[in-house]
Each structure stands twice: as structure tokens, then as C-alpha cells.
């Protein structure tokens, strides 16, 4: 079975650009999470979907970050406009709905904003 | 306050030594998961351990719900064990995950 797939693995953007990161969850998983990871802040939740419905949008990240889940097997995270402080690794994870909750992570997308 | 606290924050071992990593939590949970992350790498699940003890090779995870703690024991450490170990709670009512701040382990040859 395929795990969580994220693309691109690396992205370099100029300040002010729009970037879109993509994620395909494990087939059959109903929960999808977007996280941002930096050395200083650690892992921060950006968005959480359950069965394609947005359950949590990460509060402080609402302004320039927008995650969407158009179907059960594909999600995007748009950052618009990008700022240098957005440089981080963006991780996508999925899990089954209900009481299991075991998370499976993708390889991540490393974003560098110049 | 912080719901998950990990200790120690960092640890340096000589190859062959054992390590005990701790995760303490202040809220009710559905499960506990331990992850390993190599620098620049993704998170690899080591254990999904709602309660009790699980073993995998040189690794042992023990979660005691009523004491609100979980531990990860690494025996006979190897240089390839170097990296960051993260614990994560799955909150019972929302399926939301809360991560600890991690333990950075360095095993020297």
C-alpha cells in the first residue's frame, strides 16, 4: 500500500509568490493533517480535515494559509503571499477516523522563501 | 499550559548504553504514539501504544494512562539511533494530535 505522498519535496520561492503544496493520504484514511515544522516552534498544526470537512484551520495560520481537500484522496496547501518566515518543512499526515488515530506522515515539503 | 512534556530535551550516549525517554501529559487521551525523525527526514512511527507495553527489537514503549506518562526505552544504543524522538497524544474526543517538543538523541561511536 502506498503511504502518504507529498509533492514537491523542495520548493524555493521569492517573497510574495504563491506556492501550492500537495498531499495524497493513505488510501482509505479519512483524517488528513497539515503541519509546519521548524527548529524553533517544532510541529504546528495548520489544518485538520475529517472526511473532507475542515475541522480545524490552525488559528494563527488563517491569514495567508489555505488548505483544501477537493476529494478524499487529494489535498492542497496554498500559501499566498509567501514570506521568508514561512521557510519550514510542511508535513502532511493521515489517519483512520475514530478511535485508532495512528498517524502516517509523508516525507514533507521543504519550503525556502527568499 | 502545555499538554505534553518530553524529557530530556537532549541526550548524548556512548554506543551500547541504554536510554529512557519520557513523555508526560496533562489531559485525557485516546492513545500515545512515538515517532523517530532523522535530521531532514520525515516522522517514522515507532509505536502506537494506547496503554501497556510494546516491544520492537531494541525498543520498548510503556504507557500508563492513569499516571499520565509514557516512556520509550532504547537498549544497546547504536549510532544509527541518533535523531529526534517525538511523542504524540491523540485526544479522545477530537482525534486531534498534540506533539511533545522532542528529545534529541546523539549516540557516539
Image (cartoon, rainbow, N blue to C red):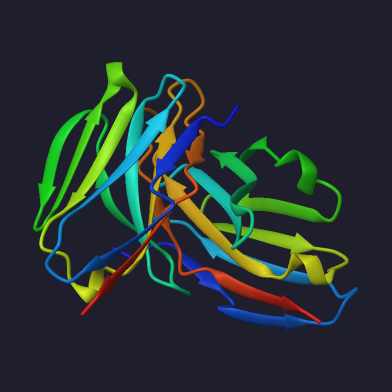
- In front of the other: B16 or B25: B16
Q: Is residue A93 visible?
A: yes
- In front of the other: A93 or B69: B69
- Compared to residue B33, the image places residue A43 above or below, namely below
The answer to which image quadrant residue B69 occupies is: top left
Where residue B4 sits in the image (x, y, percent)?
47, 34
A21 on left or right of A86: left
- Compared to residue A62, the image places residue B3 above or below, namely above
Give the mark count: 0
Residue drawn 35% across and 53% down?
A: B35
- The C terminus of chain B appears in which quarter of the rendering? bottom left
A82 on left or right of B50: right
Residue drawn 47% across and 43% down?
A: B100
The answer to which image quadrant residue A36 occupies is: bottom right
Q: Is residue A71 visible?
A: no
Where residue A68 sits in the image (x, y, percent)?
69, 52
Where residue A63 sits in the image (x, y, percent)?
86, 49
The answer to which image quadrant residue A40 occupies is: bottom right
Where residue B44 sits in the image (x, y, percent)?
34, 60
Residue drawn 14% across and 62% down?
A: B17
- Compared to residue B8, the image places residue B89 above or below, namely above
- In front of the other: B21 or A105: B21
- In front of the other: B92 or B75: B75
- Compared to residue A110, the image places residue B50 above or below, namely above
Residue drawn 42% across and 35% down?
A: B89
Amino acid at each position: 500500500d502506498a503511504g502518504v505522498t507529498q509533492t514537491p519535496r523542495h520548493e524555493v520561492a521569492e517573497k510574495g509568490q504563491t506556492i501550492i503544496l500537495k498531499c495524497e493520504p493513505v488510501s482509505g484514511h479519512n483524517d488528513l493533517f497539515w503541519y509546519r515544522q521548524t527548529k524553533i516552534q517544532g510541529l504546528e498544526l495548520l489544518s485538520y480535515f475529517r472526511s473532507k470537512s475542515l475541522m480545524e484551520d490552525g488559528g494563527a495560520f488563517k491569514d495567508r494559509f489555505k488548505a483544501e481537500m477537493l476529494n478524499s484522496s487529494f489535498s492542497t496547501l496554498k500559501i499566498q503571499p509567501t514570506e521568508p518566515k514561512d521557510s519550514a518543512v510542511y508535513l502532511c499526515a493521515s489517519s483512520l477516523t475514530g478511535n485508532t488515530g495512528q498517524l502516517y506522515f509523508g516525507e514533507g515539503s521543504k519550503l525556502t522563501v527568499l | 499550559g502545555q499538554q505534553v512534556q518530553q524529557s530530556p530535551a537532549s541526550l548524548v550516549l556512548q554506543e551500547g548504553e541504554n536510554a529512557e525517554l519520557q513523555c508526560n501529559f496533562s489531559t485525557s487521551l485516546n492513545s500515545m504514539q512515538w515517532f523517530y525523525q532523522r535530521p531532514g527526514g520525515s516522522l517514522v512511527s515507532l509505536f502506537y501504544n494506547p496503554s501497556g507495553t510494546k516491544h520492537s527489537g531494541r525498543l520498548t514503549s510503556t504507557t500508563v494512562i492513569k499516571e499520565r506518562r509514557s516512556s520509550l526505552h532504547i537498549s544497546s544504543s547504536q549510532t544509527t539511533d541518533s535523531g529526534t524522538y517525538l511523542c504524540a497524544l491523540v485526544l479522545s474526543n477530537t482525534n486531534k494530535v498534540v506533539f511533545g517538543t522532542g528529545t534529541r538523541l546523539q549516540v557516539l561511536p
